[in-house]
Amino acid sequence: MSNIQKTARLTPLLQGQQPEEVAHISSFAMIRKGNGLLLAKKIRPEFSAGKWVFPSSIINFGEHPEVAIMRIVREWVGVDSKKVRLLDVQSYGDKHWDLCFVYEVSIDEIGKLSQDIERAEYFDRGKLPPEFRSDNLEVLQNLENKMKV
């Protein structure tokens, strides 16, 4: 792991203090159909409205990341995952620390979308939409770089 640049830390707080440091632990689904990757265009929350993202979410406290990705896929695209395989674990940040579990997920079809999703489509890697969130692109690029090794 020679490419690690920063070390994340979480500082204990006194009762009533607000944290300067934040930790997000999330699961991301890489769902492929041929050469396409499934992306969802968000309606809510406001900070991601109009953006394309991978099916992903913060993991509930105590929830296993693999159980979380199956829940996320079911909630976002309305179908049960057929196959789930861990591809990567990525860590970013300092004061805002993200720990991302990236899974390959197989589904048969797209079902009923979440009310927070405008639409879901498959995109070729070379033709990702301009509204693709930069943090999701970073997850994809880091995954691709590790797969080349």
Image (cartoon, rainbow, N blue to C red):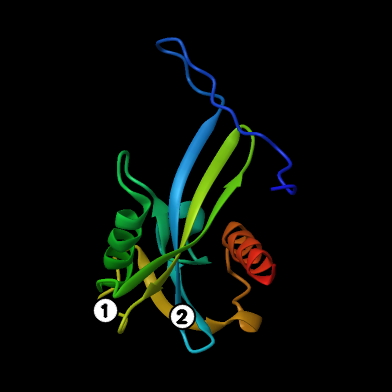
User: Label 2: how many residues lie within 10 Å, few (<14), some (14-19) or many (20+)?
Assistant: some
Provide residue 149's location: percent of width, then percent of height.
Answer: 69, 67
Q: Amino acid at mark 1?
A: Gly
| Sequence-earlier tag: 1 or 2 | 2
- Distance CA(mark 1)–CA(mark 2): 15 Å
Q: Residues within 10 Å of mark 1 (few under 14, many from 20)?
A: some
Q: Identify the residue under disc 2.
A: 32
**Front in this rendered view, residue 130 or 76:** 76
User: What residue is drawn where x is 65% and y is 64%?
Assistant: 146
Residue denoted by label 1:
111
**Number of marks in the image?**
2
Above or below residue 51? Residue 100 is above
Question: SS for tag 2?
Answer: strand
Q: What is the residue that sits farthest to the bottom in this orientation?
A: 34
The amino acid pointed to by label 2 is Arg
Q: Report which quarter residue 27 is drawn in.
A: bottom left
